[in-house]
Every structure is written in C-alpha cells, then in structure tokens.
Image: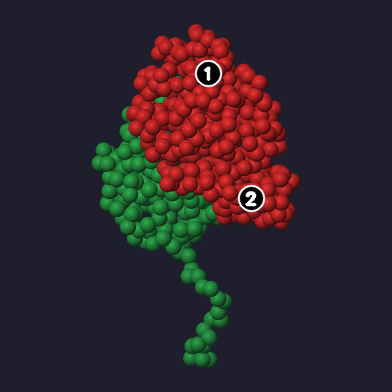
Chain colours: A green, B red
Amino acid sequence: MKEQWTIGGKTLTSRLFLGTGKFADHQDMKEAILSSNTEVVTVALRRVNLKEDDHYILNDIPDHIQLMPNTSGARNAEEAIRIARLAKASGLGDWVKVEVISDQKYLLPDNQETIKATRELAREGFQVFPYMSPDLMAGKALQEAGAAAVMPLGAPIGSNRGIRMKEIIQIMIHELEVPIIVDAGIGKPSDAAEAMEMGADAVLVNTAIATANNPVQMAKAFHEAVLAGRRGYKAGLGPTSNQAHASSPLTGFLHS
Amino acid sequence: MSFYDEYISLKTIPFQEFFDQITPEHVWHVLNKTDPLTNEEFLILLSPKAEHFLEEMAQKAHQLTVQHFGRTMQLFLPLYLTDYCVNKCKYCSFSFDHVFPRTKLTLDEIEKEAKVIKKKGIEHIILLTGESRIHSSVGYLKEAAEILKNYFSSISLEVQPLKTEEYRVLIEAGIDGLTVYQEVYNEDIYKDIHVKGPKRNYRFRLDTPERGCRAGMRSVNIGALLGLDDWRKEVFFTGMHAKYLQDNYLDTEISVSFPRLKPHLGSFQPNVHVTDIDLVQAMLAYRLFMPRSGITISTREAPELRNHLIPLGVTKMSAESSTTVGGYSKSHTGENSQFELSDHRTVEEIKQVLRDKGYHPVMKDWEILI
C-alpha cells in the first residue's frame, strides 16, 4: 500500500514537489509533472498573468495538482505578503511558498524577513511554506510563526550541488516538529534519495528536471529516487563507519 | 564611495602589457575554474588571446545561463515618449544640433501607444526620452507611469539622469527599473564627444545607476556604447561597474547591455570597429564573470546574429521595436529614430524563433505591487 502523509491540511502520497520556472516548453512541463507523480507544483506569481485569459502556465498544470504559488521576486516581508494576498485574491488557493530574497548575487533567502512574512500570512489563514537558509533557530522561529512546513535549501538555488548543508538539515529534521522539505540544490536523483534517507519529509526540484536533456525521463528518475530514499529511511539504515572492521577484534577472545 | 574612485584606479592598469603577457594556459586556467572569477581573470577572458577559446567560453556561458535562468527569454519593448534633447553629442541622432521637428506624446497618445503594444502580448516596457528636464520632467514621467501601470507588469526608465529623490517619486508611481548607459567609460573621450549640455558631467552620469539602486529600483541596467573606445577596456569597466553595484546593492538585479554604435542622423563614424566576434567575446566574458546577471540584446542587431546569440548568455530581448516617438500607433510619429534598427521581426516571429531553439518566451516576470 502506498504510504500517505498530510501537509497543509492535504493528504498526499507523493513526496516530490516540482518547480516550474525553468522549463523550455509547457508541454514538456506537463508531461514531466505527470511522469514525476507529483501532487504539488510551485508557480511564481510574478509570471502568472492574472488579468488575461492565458494565465501563462496555469492552463498547463493538471487539475489534480495542488498549486503552491511562490513569492519569487519579493525583496522583503512586505512585498512577499502583498504577493501572497494577490495570489489568494485571484483564486490560486491558500498555499504559499514564501521566498524573500534580498541578495541577487547568490539568491540566498533572508531568514529574518521570511519569519516576519510567515507570521503575518499564517495569521491570515495561509498554509505557509517558507524557503530558508538552513538554521535551527530560524527553523524554530518559523515553526513558532505558524509555518505548515519548513523548506531549507540543500545548496544555493540552481547550483545542482547536492545536499551541501547536510549536517544542519539533519539537525533540523531531528529537532523540528513541522515537516522538512529540502528545496534547492538538488542536482541528481541520488541527491533526492539522500535527502529522503536523512528523513526529510519531501524534496522540491526544478532546475535538475527542467534543464535535463529529457525532462520527462528525469522527472521519472526523481520519482523513483524519492521512493527509494523514503523506503530506505523507513527500513532503518544501518550505522555507517569510515573503516572496514573484523567482527570483534577486541573481544573475540572471549568466544574462542 | 562611488564607482568613480574605482575607475580612477582601474584606468591606470597597463592594459596592453597585461594582454601581451597572456598565454593560452592562462585562458585555460580561467575556463576550468568553478569558483567565481577575479577581476584579473575577467580581463584575461577579454584579451586577444582568449579569442581562440570562444567555443569553450560559449559552452560554459550557455551552461551557466541555463542553470541560473532556465531555458527562458524575457521579452520587452521600448516606448519613446519624446525626442526633445538639450545635449549635443557627436554620435546621437537626438542631439540638439540636428534640426528636425521634435515630438512629445500627450497622455492620450501614450495610452494609444500602450494599447498597441499591449496587443502584441508585451508586459514589460521601457520608457525612453531624449534628455530634457523640461520636456521629460519628473512630473510628466510620473503621469505616464500612472497610466501605463494599468497596462503593463513592469515599467523601466531610460531618460536623463535624475536625483535619488526623483527616482523615489517615480518608483512610488510604479516604475521598477532603470537603464542608463555610461556611453563611454574613458573620461577623456567622454568629454570630447559630449560637446554641450548637462550630459557633459561625467561623474553625475557615472553615479546614476547607484542613485537608482539607493532609491530602491528593482533592476538597474548599464552599458557602454561599443565603438567609442577600445571595446576590451570598455567592457572591462562595464563589468567592474556591474560588480561594484551588485556587491553594494545586493537586492537590486544588475544587468548589462552591449549596444554597438549605430548612428542614424549625422556623419559620426565609430572610433573603433566592433565586429561580431568582438561582441560575442564581450558577452561571453561577462557571463563567465557575472553568472547570475541579466544580459539584454536589442533590435539594433541583425536577425541572424540575434538568433545565434540566444544561447550564449542573453536573458532579455526586445522585439518589434519602434525607436521613433509615437511609432506604434502612428498617432503622432516622430520623424527621426534614435538609431537604426536591424531586426524588424514581430513579437510572434521572435517567440517562434525562441521556441524553435528550445526556449520559453517569458512575457511577464513581475507584478506591479503599487
């Protein structure tokens, strides 16, 4: 039986979330969404044309998918809040991924402003999914502010460098009660599997799928990697060691 | 602190000596780096030696651009509001000593232009004027923005340099981007070709992008008009200026253009001939130096070249542009374009070219929050 889990008031089976910003073609995007088995897709509100019939991207996202508008482009809490309200008022639902980036050099999220925006939007009844720089205290503050989940980056966005922030994210997984979704930096299916083996609740992938030579096949590979990583985590991974060792070098004599 | 202080020290670099000692190994070393490039490494990529590595540079530039921007291209159009100008500049058609009937759009005419542009599916526009504080006053620009924000998702400005407080007023009215070209970083040449008018003030123009950042512009676009001095130096200064702005104003998106001199009226000839190869090398070197920065290419360049430039690092393109005042609705057409256009393809044609090349044309990439 497929394992189910609940997040933001919704029951899901997939633990792979998809970003949409970097696809060359909406038909590819649609097929990638389907082959990834995802149930949650992020969309930058800045790209959605709310006034026109052609909503840029929304017509190409299958109906069963939960939309997660993001506040991409916001440079402070105030802008993020305004974008989120606009999304909700336009009928895009009450899920929002809060992205506040005041650094155009590395595109690292501003945790302080993210906490502020999360507090206000949670108070207004949004299901808030804040994207953040991995940090335990900031994670706790986001949880306290009412976040539905916390989304630490694995590595700088678009870097495809894997789970570089592993130690801190592992601590967050151990210490926070809200779900942890590893977002950004996941470059290969094996990186996604690694995050899931660590005990992350889900991963969000965009660049690695959208810019692959074959996005549809890559989406499928991520789906399989997320399943494998989750299964590995649930099965209980054995302890790891740096050196190979004989079964009982020090106490073997007791049994000889 | 101003970029001027940096310029004063950068201009003493012995460029020729530096270029002379570059070997292919130097270029290889830079191309194999994964860490950010130093200023010196940027200059290595601009050297004559690096010209032999254009394919390798292009591969890397393409990969970095797709990684950071995806397979997307943002489209925009220029909207000329007036061609009145108080400057005398040797290379520009709008220069006040060129006698032709000048035009300024009324607010009604601006709205007519907006409707025509909007029909093409365009969401991002840039407002252009000649440089005249009387004819393109802050009040006039503010009124224009207040109309245009009902039609468009993002409005940038390319007008005479303004003060920080004036930019703040325009941001309040819905303007979110600023473009200002230094034209030429070489201060001596600058003084020579900007013969009369407020534009002669090199320092005030050089500090304009920084005033825009301070005022809170979301995006600031800079550039040098290639052909006025040695392009290798000019592109180096442009890159250093972009880096200075990005380092000091982290929340502003800094982007660059590489306009090549293309005069329309007048007989001014470029001081330096900048070839297609030079243009490509400039763009690639900049992309490797500033991997996340935007690069804009206008319809000054020819269709075939523009097609080839798409995968080399470009992130924004104009299409179906008119560089005459009132040129879209023909309600009140200026007689003189600021520069001659080469690419006359329609927005739909450009979108199709992008799709054929595996790029998604992005029409809208912001939402005015004011």
Q: Residue at x 27, y 39 (%)?
A: A125
Q: Are marks 2 and 1 in contact (CB under 8 Å)?
A: no
Which disc is residue B96 wearing? 1
The disc labelled 1 sits on which kind of residue?
A: Phe
With respect to residue A177, does B334 lie above or below? above
Q: Secondary structure at mark 2?
A: loop
State whether discs 2 and 1 lie on one chain: yes
Q: Secondary structure at mark 1?
A: loop
Residue B58: which quarter of the image? top right
Spatial CA span between label 2 and label 1: 37 Å
Residue B140's spot in the image, x, y percent?
Answer: 38, 19
Q: Return the residue at label 2.
A: B14
Q: Nearer the viewer, residue A74 or A138?
A: A74
Q: Nearer the viewer, residue B115 or B178?
A: B178
Structural crowding at the residue carrying mark 2, measured as other residues with C-alpha within 10 Å and reported as few (<14), some (14–19) or many (≥20): few
Q: Residue at x 63, y 23 (%)?
A: B263
Residue A185's spot in the image, x, y percent?
Answer: 50, 51
Is residue A254 visible to the viewer in this orientation of the structure? Answer: yes
Chain letter belonging to callout 2 = B
Residue B67's spot in the image, x, y percent?
Answer: 57, 44
On the rendered structure, is B32 left or right of A46? right
Structural crowding at the residue carrying mark 1, measured as other residues with C-alpha within 10 Å and reported as few (<14), some (14–19) or many (≥20): many
